[in-house]
Image (cartoon, rainbow, N blue to C red):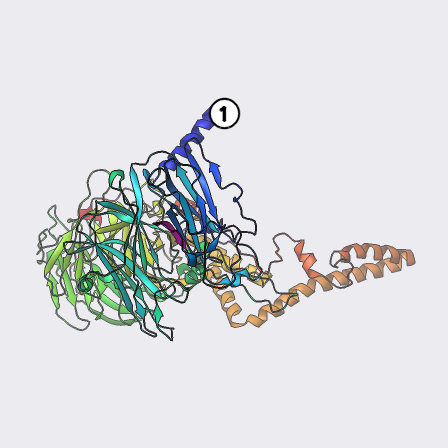
Amino acid sequence: MAGLINNLLILLLVFQNSSLGFRNPLSVFKRYKDTTRSLSSECLGNNRPVISLGLTDFSLDIRMPGVTPKQSDTYLCMSLRLPVDEEAYVVDFRPQASMDTVHHMLLFGCNIPSSTENYWDCDEGTCTDKSNILYAWARNAPPTRLPKGVGFQVGGETGSKYFVLQVHYGDVSAFRDKHKDCSGVTLHLTHQRQPLIAGMYLMMSVDTVIPPGEKVVDADIACHYQKYPMHLFAFRVHTHRLGQVVSGYRVRNGQWTLIGRQSPQLPQAFYPVEHPVDINFGDTLAARCVFTGEGRTTDTHIGGTASDEMCNFYIMYYMEAKHAVSYMTCTQNINPDMFRNIPQEANIPIPVKSDMIMMTHGHHEETKKTDKSSSLKQPKREEEEVLDQDFHIEEAVDWPGVNLKLGQVSGLALDLKNNLVIFHRGDHVWDGNSFDSSFVYQQRGLGPIEQNTIFVIDPSNAEVLDSTGKNLFYLPHGLSIDKDGNYWVTDVALHQVFKLGVHDKEPMLILGRSLQPGSDKNHFCQPTDVAVDPVTGNIYVSDGYCNSRIVQFSPNGMFIMQWGEETSVGKAKPGQFHIPHSLTLVPEFGQLCVADRENGRIQCFRSETGEFTREIKHKLFGREIFAVSYISGGLLFAVNGAPYSGDIEPVQGFVMNFSTGEIIDTFIPVRKSFEMPHDVVASEDKTVYVGDAHARTVWKFTSTEKMEHRSVKKAGIEVQEIKEAETVIEARLKNKPASTESLKKWEKQHMVEQASPGISFVLITTLLIIPIVVLLAIAAFIRWRKTRVYGADGEHKLESSSGRILGRLQGKGSGGLNLGNFFASRKGYSRKGFDRLSTEGSDQEKDEDDGTDSEEEYSAPPPPPVSSSS
């Protein structure tokens, strides 16, 4: 048995070491941050800088030898000789530093360091011979592991013999306690020959000036590449506080291909290049940094202090060993005119939450002590909570919109005034008789829908403000609204796309041929949705139930291009669709995301080129994703389909972090139940609307503070509120409506709490005093009875008995009443000022509840698209 366990452990280690090793830095940020707190004054690991990791591998600990910088913007260097003479390869970099003390670190490779001292001021230089940058770190970036078979070559006849660590200490206020810093980096090296040699390409602006108050300043860098092919696998951006976004590209034959794009205010890690990019002889490498001078009163120049700026774009690459070049730089702009054609995404700052910026800058604010005897220090929450978004989506149970009389709800959008716009089918229904096998509509005899199909709804009270769309449509489907307020809709029966003015009776533009399905540039086949780029005005149509493509048109309706194909047998590949059902534009990233319905995933593409960028797919999605909606700030909303027979994933809504693809929250309604949530739309304040084709209704959801973040400083009163809320939440998780009494009771209590915070104090005081008064009254009564029955001897016994009772309420050696000690003995009480109450389970727990308690009925798997796909 022991041998079997050992073999399993070895296999596990081999599997881990064979993986690519690159993970999204935001997804591992919290776990890594937990292990990189400020180091103590003892230089951990410095006594054993070399540790064997087996027959061929070893680790090398490169640390500052306990330094205390005396002034801000100090650059200190130290060197360490490679402990072996033969060739070795660096395959892993693990930083040992915190942004609390270190602004950034660089690791160089060379043969002759500028000093032989334990450490020195880097103004003296780093190396006296040629040096190569091997690694760069800043702002709590997580570790970097190279792809399998790739390594930085060191030692031997041609590799570097020394490592030189340069540490920039920006603000030395962290050293007021005179502690010694031992920041650095741990390397994993191997003697196994790597077939591919890694190198670093640094693109850097050296002459940019940022005028004070200037909103946008671009720093552009471009160089011709004139060496053997290199293959890019990671990138890193670096600026100081004024940097908004940094982007890097390969330019070949006039075509711009993204290498990487990131906010320099996020952890400055080496991020993986999403899609392989190769650089050949004759290509051009180009990069742009976007700065703002707002908040500055003087010019800001490129320089080495924290008040200066930098514009750096680092690229990690690998080359065949026989042609390998370990380090290259680009510091010029060979063709300024070419940047007129740079993709629009390079000019759009990536939004970063203010608390995320504070975190990456190393600020850890604490609540000030106003009363040393009673105030407790409240540390800043861990990074996982910051990234996890401090809100929760739940139904607005008092919104009357669920009672609107609607047909099958197919599309939702928000107009320029943030009113909700609903697209529905009136008295028409899509069923198995609607189309023949050639997708030709079979119910034309019914005529167009005689009711208004487009309603404009007041978002606060669900009052119908306007309505239109009578006698125009047969089977409405998708709806969107452009930046000018025009309606764009699709009709799957007509196989057409329409542009409608708000008050126009006739369409302003029609795409497709009426009632004629097709797959060329002039025909659609049951088009599902439409999106209009707010910058370019280009039109994107998802087509559809019987085509598997995205079609792009100019603002006046001229065909530009199309992409996509049917899903092949087996796993769906990028760019393949099985009913592209819903579209949403992501302007900050220049992307278009598609709800690939029957493949149960979201696919995103570059809106200008149709180039695939990413897939978002989770087990919780189940087999279908019906709709998707994006809001600025990096949030993506989606709804899935009802589970197939035997599946357990519930039908629900999702909130996701667009950058990482991670699910932040899920939601379902309290009133009624999701049956076929067909479309979703969200506003900037995180208000979400979901329209259901089968339930023929629309729900409104709003963002609220997460229950587990509420304090219990209100003692019994707030605990009661949480318990009442649990009733509502539990019902919502089980997809069952809570009782009206529970809802009303919870709402009433919540309203009273917000309206009259002073009442809580009075109630708490009363609740605390009543038991004491009762206890004293009982003690007095017992004493009176004992005195009457036993006389003086009874009085003595009473004092002994009551003393034991009251002793629990009194502090040691204190004659006063110590309620803290009394309540501290009670289960669940904490002295820390507040406890977090967990009223919701994990995702897995929610799944189990939803899957086992759902009242939805699914008698059979959904029929084929021609008859099912409302």
- The foreground one among 658 and 481 is 658
**Residue at the right extreme of this rendering:** 792
Residue 581 in the figure: left or right of residue 706: left
Residue 298 location, x and y as percent?
37, 74
Residue 800 image-quadrant placement: bottom right
- Figure disc tally: 1
Residue 551 image-quadrant placement: bottom left
Which residue is disc 1 drawn over?
Answer: 2
- Crowding near the residue tagged with mark 1, few <14, some 14–19, many ≥20 C-alpha atoms within 10 Å: few
Which stretch is magenta? Answer: 126-137
Residue 621 in the figure: left or right of residue 767: left
- The foreground one among 327 and 5 is 327
Residue 67 location, x and y as percent?
52, 54
Q: Look at the image and say whether residue 703 sits in the magenta stretch.
A: no
- The foreground one among 775 and 297 is 297
Residue at screen point 50% across, 50% down: 118
- The foreground one among 474 and 570 is 570
Is there any visible trace of residue 325 in the rendered image? yes
Compared to residue 564, the image places residue 336 above or below, namely: below
Residue 329 in the figure: left or right of residue 826: left
Residue 56 location, x and y as percent?
41, 32
Q: Amino acid at mark 1?
A: Ala
Q: Look at the image and say whether residue 136 sits in the magenta stretch.
A: yes
Disc 1, SS: helix
Residue at screen point 12% across, 53% down: 441
Residue 662 location, x and y as percent?
36, 51
Is there any visible trace of residue 843 in the rendered image? no
